[in-house]
Amino acid sequence: MATSVEKAGSVPEHCPGTESANAGKASACAGCPNQQICASGPKGPDPGIQLVKERLEQVRNKILILSGKGGVGKSTVTALLGRSLAAADKERNVAVLDIDICGPSQPRVLGALNEQVHQSGSGWSPVYVDDNLSVMSIGFLLSSPDDAVIWRGPKKNGMIRQFLSEVDWGTLDYLLMDTPPGTSDEHLSASTYLSQAGLTGAVIVTTPQEVALLDVRKEIDFCRKVNIRILGVVENMSIFVCPCCKRLSEIFPAATGGAKKMCEDLKVPFLGSLPLDPTIARYCDEGRDFVGDLPNSPAVDALNGIVTRLVEMCDSKEE
Ligand SMILES: Nc1ncnc2c1ncn2[C@@H]1O[C@H](COP(=O)(O)OP(=O)(O)OP(=O)(O)O)[C@@H](O)[C@H]1O
């Protein structure tokens, strides 16, 4: 098994793996550039995996929100799903965890920009934006929202482990985890730490144009490779309805049939489309509650349909 410190092509053919008691000591390790590191490193699975499992025992559904490309509206959709899930049933406890370490946007989108998290004996307390909707983000730990987080993989890995194992969520029905775009350190860390905790699955957000769908196919491939169930794809900014003349325009043309066709081709559930609505952008920039304030808008209608299908997917065992 290759470790991140090994150079490509330098893994001995019979590498015993870093978790093995023989790591660094087996005959196959002789001459490997990482022999010393493997011989002296801790053995066995990362204890963080067990800690995350214990911490998330009271969380019924754990959902990763993914996107292939940046800027397709993943954070916006995460926040809106959180608001809609929480608004639909006041008995339901929902939380959003922002693991986009380098670009945390949930504090702004959920209107909690100047909040701070508190530490108690039972862990970090998340910030409540509603009675049944809480949020945790690295954004709360930065001294200024303009601070840049420039971290390498191991440090991001440590922060994700802390977020997953030290936040005192209480009992939750849905935990939505907003990730960075693509498939990077954060995704690998999250999927590893959640491997024993019962990850419900992933929602993939995209826009309709082929350049975005190309990267969604990679994201689907990633999920299949690391055994993450795909709960469905959300197509964001699929259509624009002019607020003046009500004419429909395709801002991002679905030249290859859009996300729905791609889902049919790849046999992945399609959760629905969300229109491009400038009011969504304004509300999210200002951290206001779009779902609560405009419950009769076509976008909230579309969102509620997506949430209904998502809940059905979570409640059903198989795709
Ligand atoms: N349905 C929508 N209608 C109008 N504006 C939207 C919609 N969805 C997202 N936006 C806007 O698009 C911009 C990008 O959205 P967002 O930050 O959620 O994308 P992202 O995919 O999370 O980006 P990143 O790659 O940085 O994580 C934001 O200004 C947001 O308000």
Image: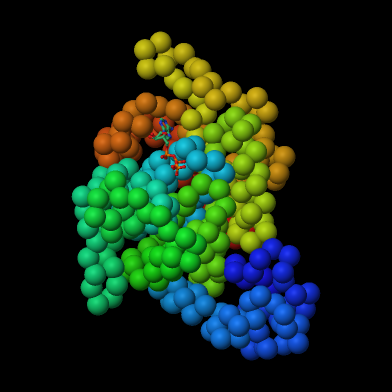
In this view, the residue in front, 308 or 68, is 68
- The percent position of residue 253, horizontal first and vertical second, equals 58, 23
Tell me, what colour scheme is on the image?
rainbow
* 235 w.r.t. 49: above or below: above
The mark tally for this picture is 0
* Residue for point 47% across, 37% down: 71
Quarter-of-image position of residue 59: bottom left
Q: Quadrant of ligand 1?
A: top left
- The percent position of residue 259, horizontal first and vertical second, equals 61, 35
Residue 92: in sight, yes or no?
no
In this view, the residue in front, 206 or 114, is 114
* Residue for point 51% across, 69% down: 193
Quarter in which the N terminus is drawn: bottom right
> Relative to 244, is 124 on the left or the right?
left
Quarter-of-image position of residue 81: top left
Quarter in which the C terminus is drawn: bottom right
Residue 274: in sight, yes or no?
yes
* 319 w.r.t. 308: above or below: below
* 163 w.r.t. 212: above or below: below
- The percent position of residue 142, horizontal first and vertical second, equals 28, 56
Quarter-of-image position of residue 214: top right
- The percent position of residue 82, horizontal first and vertical second, equals 38, 49
Q: Looking at the image, which residue sits at the far right?
A: 13
In this view, the residue in front, 235 or 215, is 215
* Residue for point 40% across, 55% down: 150
> Relative to 20, is 70 on the left or the right?
left
* Residue for point 30% across, 50% down: 147
> Relative to 185, is 10 on the left or the right?
right
